[in-house]
Image: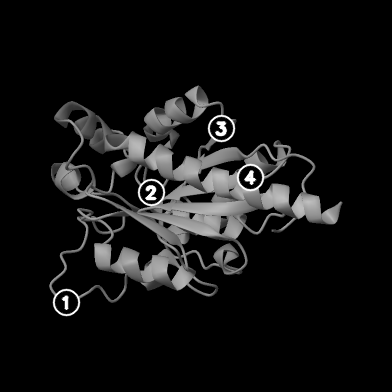
Amino acid sequence: MPALFTSTVVSVVLVHGAFADGSGWQGVYRILKKDGYNVSIVQNSTIRLEDDVAVTRLAIAGIEGPVLLVGHSYGGAVVTEAGNDPKVAGLVYVTAFVPDSGESVSSLIKDPPPGTAGPPILPPQNGYLLLDRTKFREAFAADVDKTTAEFMADSQAPWGLAAFGGVIKEAAWRTKPSWYLLATQDKMIPPAAQKFMSQRAGSTVVEVPASHAVYVSHAGPVAKLIEQAADEIRGRVAARTAVAR
């Protein structure tokens, strides 16, 4: 455990990924709030990894007690770096990238498994990446209703090449517990890649038959894993506090 906390109340910080914003967490947020959790949602620019890490750390700074960082997709890279904050007691990856020190999202996807169709990312324009709108739902949100998926496609945020290639300085999962929700129907991050990254990190893994947008389409299972992680962190904090006394 990174710090000796005076409280066992675990707060949750939700970090979105590329081509999206924090509004996608609404369903998960509502469940966690109903169940009594203090929840913050980070709004990343997704332009530079360093900036997104700084914004996430700003959210952490305003919280008392242990923090559970949750990252979706590229947000996994953000929480991997931001998770080194002493207040962070655990990490939850939701069909996310889990880079090691010296790695980036770019380096993780440079050698896709044979026969794997890559995501429909358009050629860079002025230093930014976007998904092909006509292929967005199939690749990103196949199990999200058509109207919502169309809105997500039309409101997608450009992903900066500096964020895509941002290198992790120190991987927090090497010193802190982690959990991973593996979306078995993901067409953005192949399930095999998710399995490799989660196993390497020693994460507790839960599989859900869902698309990359599992946090939108299956908010219940996502929230359940977050609450499971929070319960385990609460127990660790309480045990460590008791020993310290």
Q: Decide: marks 1, 2 in contact (CB < 8 A)? A: no
**Quick check: can you spot residue 12?**
yes
Seen from the viewer's position, the closer of residues 236 and 28 is 236
Q: Amino acid at mark 4?
A: Arg
Q: Amino acid at mark 2?
A: Ala
Q: Please, what secondary structure does the residue beneath circle 2 have? A: loop
Mark 3 or mark 2, whichever is nearer to me: 3
Which residue is found at the position 28% from the left and 76% from the top? 111
Which residue is found at the position 33% from the left and 67% from the top? 195
Neighbours of disc 4 within 10 Å: few (<14), some (14-19), many (20+) = some
The earlier-in-sequence mark between 4 and 2 is 2
Residue under label 3: 39
Q: Is residue 28 above or below residue 232?
A: above
Q: Amino acid at mark 1?
A: Pro
Mark 4 or mark 3, whichever is nearer to me: 4
Measure the C-alpha gap from mark 1 to mark 2: 24 Å
Where in the figure is residue 46, as x and y percent of width and height?
Answer: 46, 48
Residue under label 4: 234
Residue 168 relative to residue 151: left or right: right
Q: Decide: marks 1, 4 in contact (CB < 8 A)? A: no
> Any mark on residue 18, and which?
2
Mark 1 or mark 4, whichever is nearer to me: 4
The earlier-in-sequence mark between 1 and 4 is 1
